[in-house]
Image: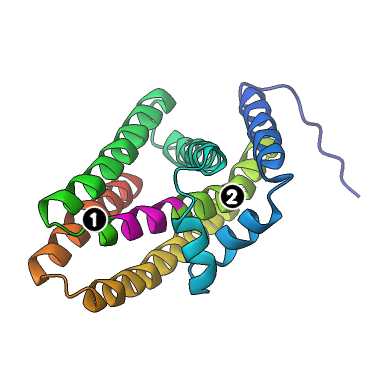
Amino acid sequence: MQLIERVLNDHLYLLIIMIITTIIISYSIKNRPTLLKSIVLAHIKKTDFKFVLNNTQDRIITILFWTSILLQALALCFVFEEKNISPTIVLIVFTTLVIIKRGLITISGVIFQKKKLSETYLASFIIMAIQIGWASAAFSLYRIIYHSSFNTNLFSNISTIFFTVIVFYILSRFIILLRTAKKEEVSFLHIIFYLCTLEILPLAIILVLINR
């Protein structure tokens, strides 16, 4: 059996951030098992989605959302590290995109006079962010622990699989949102505006930067 020595490196502080984030998440859902279950099953069961929808202003939901955004940002920092892009830039750009997207979802509900649909979109976005954030934690953890000895090809394959799963997840979410919009008799213009500016564009920007 081959032993691998792990020396201290600059990425260990990221592990500390992940541990603190995990503790915050665990504390937040400690007494809210129903909320955890609803977040996990929200895009599968309507009752769970409705439960989250009715609690989007809950402090626990807010905490889970922003800690998950932090976990996603950490994962992106590792991806862009190979391209010599500053983690600070990644964090600022990603956080800015998230804030803009939340704002545009709310504004779109006012512009198109579809407040209920806007709230549904926002709840779906929050759920997606939390789920992807939790999934990205395992990705980041592997990169932190094996920073000095990880296999580049293996990491590349893991990255490809991870982002492929994310893309399919987002596409399935598109279908759910389109069905919801159809039931609400939303105009075709509204659907195109939402998909192009709030869903496709941010994802396209990230994928283009990754493939550069």
Which of the 4 image quadrants contains residue 191? bottom left
Query: Which type of secondary structure does the marked residue at label 2 adopt?
Result: helix
**In front: 56, or 157?**
56
Question: Where residue 94 sits: x, y (%)?
Answer: 35, 36
Q: For the residues marked 2 and 1, what is the alpha-carbon distance in whole angstroms?
A: 29 Å
Residue at 14%, 57% (x, y): give it: 113
What number is the disc on residue 134?
2
Check the image and report above or below for 80 versus 189: above
Highlighted range, magenta:
119-126
Main SS, magenta region, reads: helix
Relative depth, front residue between 151 and 72: 72
Q: Secondary structure at mark 1?
A: helix
Q: Indicate yes or no whether the magenta region holds residue 125.
A: yes
The residue pinned by badge 1 equals 115
Q: Which mark is residue 138?
A: none
Label 2 vs label 1, nearer the camera: 1
